[in-house]
Structures are given as structure tokens and as C-alpha cells.
Image: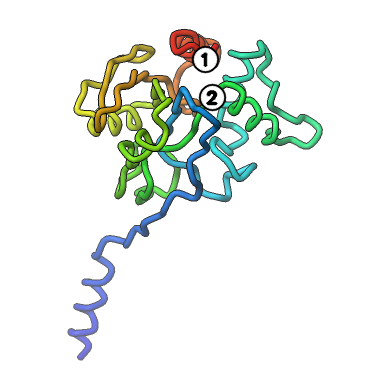
Amino acid sequence: MCCIARFFRTFVTSMPAVVNIERHPWQPFIPPHPRLLMLGTFPPKPERWSMDFYYPNKINDMWRLMGYVFYGDRVHFWNEAESCFQLDKIKAFLNEHGIALWDTAMAVRRLKGNASDKFLDIVEPIDLAALLKAHPTIAAVATAGEKATGVIAAIAGCDAPDMGRMTECEVAGHEFALWRMPSSSRAYPLSIDKKAAYYRTMMAATGIL
């Protein structure tokens, strides 16, 4: 019996740990008559959220980039007194400019327990065809990061554009411009000024700015 017990202990400890599937926590944010769809990969774990909305991590720079690009003020959406983003202000901005938000992964496995794209196994990608069919005014899709760009390029069957560039794509008869943007994560090795320059160019080219 002791030999059998030792065998099963060895077998169990040698098995890979089960990585749970995590589903996306939010529905897409769609303003009236959206013109631009911005897509990341997947939100961080809830313990990293500072708000119940896209790019919720306090040290993610997406909302600082948007403040910088549109208002010349990195802290335009930041409430210093309460140390949080101003969600109502962010949503009003998105509605005003016709910017929709969602992500490219609807379900993932976190292989390392963090939000790094490198260690996200995408179990279920976005149903882009259904989203575009429901919102035909979307003329451009901007992906933040290499992984998100690769997902959309694969769905559309087109080549992934270089950083800051765009390529014409089509999904289920819906034509759109696919723009590749830098990740807003501070782990991405590019200054906020240079990231903002890419976003400013894209926003101007799509008629948003």
C-alpha cells in the first residue's frame, strides 16, 4: 500500500496545475453612432481595478493618454483628491467623440496569474462580425498591443499593420481601417509622449480629433 500511495503522490504532484477559464467582466461600451472601436486584450484581475470599467488600473496610462491627446492635460480624467479616474467624465468623452470600447478576448486563461498579454491564453475571441453588423457606423478599429492586433488581423484575414500604421480590412462585408497602437501599459517600453503621438495621429486620421 505504501508503494501505491507514493505512486499517487508522485503522479498528482507531477500533474500541471489547472488554470481556470476567466470570462470578460463587461459588455462593450457603445456610444450612439460609434465611429471608432478601440480594443485591448483583456482586463486585469479585479483586485487591480480602481473602477468598474475599461483600463481600470491606476497605473495604466490609457486615460492619461486620452487626456493628453484631446485636452493637453494628462490628468484631465484623474481626481487627485480621491486618487481615482473620473468615470462619468470618461464616459461623456467617449459618447461625445463616438469611441466604442471592448476587448479582443471574451474568455482567457491567465497562465501566470497576471494581465500580461504574453501569458494570456485566449479561449474565446471577440465576435467581431456580430459587433460590426450591429454597429455599421464603425469605420475604424484601433488595437492596443501586439496580441490584440494579431487577433483582429487573424479574424479579418489581413496582415497586421506596423506600429502606428493602418491596413484596410473586411469582416462579414464590413470594411474598416485597422490601426495598431502601442499598449497603454507602463510595462510597454515607450514614453507617454511617444505613445500619445501615435494615438494623436490615429485619432486625426479617423476624423475623431
Q: Is residue 13 above or below residue 32?
A: below
Q: Amino acid at mark 1?
A: Ile
Where's residue 191, x and y in %? 52, 15
- Please say if the residues under marks 2 and 1 sit with CB atoms less than 8 Å apart: yes
Q: Tell me which label, 2 or 1, sits earlier in the chain.
A: 2
Residue lying furthest bottom: 1
Residue that carries the numbered disc 2 in the rendered image: 98
Front residue of 67/205: it is: 205
Q: Secondary structure at mark 1?
A: loop
The percent coordinates of residue 19 (x first, y second) are 34, 58
* Residue at the (61%, 14%) spot, across then down: 70
Left or right: where does residue 146 sit relative to residue 53?
left
Q: Quadrant of residue 149?
A: top left
Residue 138 horizontal/vertical position (percent): 41, 25
Quadrant of the image for the C terminus? Answer: top right
Residue name at image x 55 percent, y 26 percent: 62
Dividing the picture into quadrants, the one containing residue 67 is: top right
Identify the image's colour scheme: rainbow, by chain, secondary structure or one colour: rainbow
* Residue identified by numbered label 1: 208
Secondary element under disc 2, as helix, strand or loop, is loop
Give the distance between the C-alpha atoms of the residues marked 2 and 1, in whole angstroms: 8 Å
**Quarter placement of the N terminus:** bottom left
